[in-house]
Image (cartoon, rainbow, N blue to C red):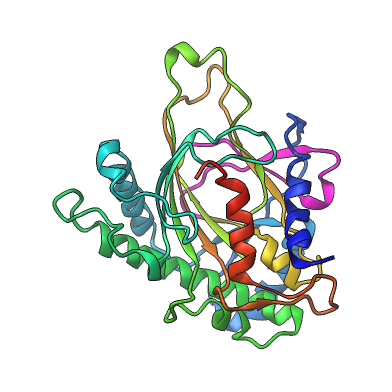
Amino acid sequence: MNSTSHGMAELQKEARMGAMGSETSAREIRRIDLSDFERRKAEIADQIWDASVDVGFFQVANHGVDLQDIRDAFAMTERFFALPDSVKAQYPHKKALNVGWESRAQLRPSTGTHDQKESYQITRPHMDGLYPSEKELPDFKPAMLEFERKSWAVGMKILSCFALKLGFHDEFFTRAHDPSTQSYQSTLRLLHYYAIAPDAQNNLGLWRAGAHTDFDCLTLLYQRAGQGGLQVCPGKEMEAQEWTSIPPLEDVITCNIGDMLMRWSDDRLPSNFHRVKNPVPGEYMGPRYSLAFFCQANRDQVIESPSGKYPPITAGDYLNQRIGANFKSY
């Protein structure tokens, strides 16, 4: 089987996840304390590994990003999305580079419908001409790049735990996500799920975002208190399609395994499915904002499974396959 057909295997699994399924609160989403990281690294690595093998989702506390910095990033995100569409359209999404602004463009293989959201992608080497001007949104570029840098640091700390458990060099994933090169493709994604109009609140579809796995090694998700809807289903339990809601807590970062790390681990670390469900009558119907940092290995980095289960493929080719299948309308 060649790398292209292997790349589509993830999509074939995703296409089977469009049903409503059922909900369960029995699944534990573990919270892991990252404080005193260097001294406790072996202990933390064991906790992260166990949570990842079990569910594929976990939350980290005392992660090193100040709560005020997170709140400031959300405030800037809200200001960006409040700009007129005519302004945001000056900074359009470029599918091949995974940068810029899009609205309702992401088509999920699981549902065949477009996510009810807009998003803006920051991928450092490819942002020329894609930041709003200082007149349009003062301090946006330096503020969001600094938040991206802090998110990268947390991601590399967590990925070093996976390197330890997989028997890789401690700096393996840090080198694979080197931000100093032009092949860097880790992405900070700003997300705005649209508020639900009063006349639509009793006739909602199932999802704001359809079920999917992430394309990357590791995703860091920041949520705003009171703006829920995120649900997860471990990949190894996909046949049952039982979903667990993740409470939106602003002082923790929610982490999940992506498909690149699944390949690098020979499937020992399964990527899992997640979705954003629509609220039901009586729940919060306003806009939902979230911030996601995707630890995506550099474009020229070759993803190789240790046993040869998957054929080698560059992270750039792999990401292009997955993005191409999700933004077909571009």
Instruction: Tell me which residue sits at (62%, 84%) in the image.
Output: 172
Queried whether the magenta region covers residue 307, the answer comes back as no
Instruction: Tell me which residue sits at (53%, 18%) in the image.
Output: 282
Where residue 208 sits, quadrant-wise, is: top right
The percent coordinates of residue 315 (x first, y second) are 62, 70
Is residue 49 at least partly visible in the picture? yes
Residue 253 or residue 107, whichever sits in front: 107
Q: 157 above or below 322? A: below
Residue 46 or residue 216, whichever sits in front: 216
Q: 212 above or below 63? A: above
Residue 330 or residue 88, whichever sits in front: 330
Q: Which residues are magenta?
A: 226-252
The percent coordinates of residue 267 (x first, y second) are 81, 65
The percent coordinates of residue 17 (x first, y second) are 75, 39
Where residue 149 sits, quadrant-wise, is: bottom left
The percent coordinates of residue 59 (x first, y second) are 60, 56
Where residue 22 sits, quadrant-wise, is: top right
Residue 75 shown left or right of residue 259 in the figure: left
Instruction: Tell me which residue sits at (45%, 68%) in the image.
Output: 64
Residue 121 shown left or right of residue 214 in the figure: left
Is residue 231 at least partly visible in the picture? no
Q: 20 above or below 10? A: above
Instruction: Tell me which residue sits at (41%, 51%) in the image.
Output: 93
Image quarter (top left, top right, bottom left or bottom right) of the N terminus:
bottom right
Residue 179 or residue 65, whichever sits in front: 179
